[in-house]
Amino acid sequence: MEHALPRAATPGAPGHPAETLRPRVPVQPTAEDRAHGAPPAPRTPLRRTSVRGQVLDGLRAALVAGDLTPGEVYSAPGLAERFGVSATPVREAMQQLAVEGAVEVVPNRGFRVIERDARELAELAEVRALIEVPVMLRLAHSVPADRWTALRPLAEETVAAAETGDRARYADSDRAFHSAVLGLGGNRQLTTVAADLHRRAQWPLVTGPLSRRRTDLVADAAQHLALLEALAGRDLPAVQTLVREHFAGAR
């Protein structure tokens, strides 16, 4: 059956269509902005020049937050109503999510959110470790300590996001931190591939809780700070152990 998200009668209230699947970009600053103390941006309507991208961001955030349930079918017109846009940019965004493996097309109905299991999550963690562990070990040899210190605000933002229990905010800040670390290597192709794997690893499972508990997120975020210290100190055994434990804990 086609799944409909709950609606609230009062505009502006939690759960109202304008709030349920609103894109995060116009509402919240980026993780980098928050790390530098930027205040939240005012809520603004979707701009037509970037509506597809903003809808895509909103749908990705809804996936991470568990607002889009694995196994359920969602129609483009139904989601479009909640964004206040036409169905076209929603279909385009959902097609992109289909390419990424988050949803599948259901002819004449809409899009079904993919049902994933723990094995897929474990496989993603293994692949991420194969990519990121050797890169971080190489960077620990070559990157000066002050470059790692400059990334501390991003690590601190992951801690702040984890403490709120906001899964979508934590997912954003987590990806921002890992992308910044890998970005020091200068390989944009590697950073793009790693970011795609990271995003897929953040989608909820079909069985068990939709997300890790707040305490798990806080522990995960704390490892970012420890990792920066190990990288700055060129403690290679600690770097390898922390990264592998980090991915193991994300399963």
Image (spheres, helix red, strand yellow):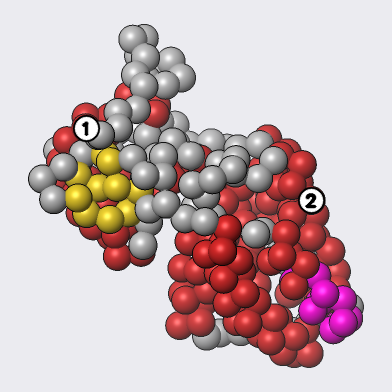
Tell me what residue is drawn at x 68 percent, y 51 percent: 158
Q: Which residue is denoted by mark 1 in the rendering?
A: 78
Residue 220 percent across, percent down from the top left: 74, 54
Q: Determine whether the residue tagged by mark 2 lies in a helix, strand or loop.
A: helix
Identify the image quadrant of residue 6.
Answer: top left
Classed neighbour count for the residue bearing mark 1: other residues with Cα under 10 Å, few (<14), some (14–19), many (≥20): some
Residue in front for this viewpoint, 151 or 125: 125
Q: How many marks?
A: 2
Residue 43 seen in this snapshot: yes
Residue 126 coordinates in the image, percent (x, y):
62, 74
* Quarter occupied by the C terminus: bottom right
User: Residue 184: x, y in percent?
Assistant: 63, 79
- Farthest left residue in view: 108
Q: In which quarter of the image is residue 150?
A: bottom right
* Distance CA(mark 2)–CA(mark 1): 37 Å
Confirm whether the magenta stretch covers residue 237: yes
Q: 50 left or right of 216? A: left
Mark number, residue 59: none
Q: What kind of residue is marked 1?
A: Gly
Quadrant location of the N terminus? top left
Q: Mark 2 points at which residue?
A: 219
Q: Please indicate whether residue 106 sits to the left or right of residue 30 in the image.
A: left
Magenta segment boundaries in residue numbering: 234-243
Residue 175, placed above or below residue 86: below
Residue at 74% over, 72% down: 243
Between 138 and 115, the one nearer to me in the picture: 115
Residue drawn at 21 percent across, 39 percent down: 75
Q: Does the magenta stretch include residue 24?
A: no
The amino acid marked with disc number 2 is Ala
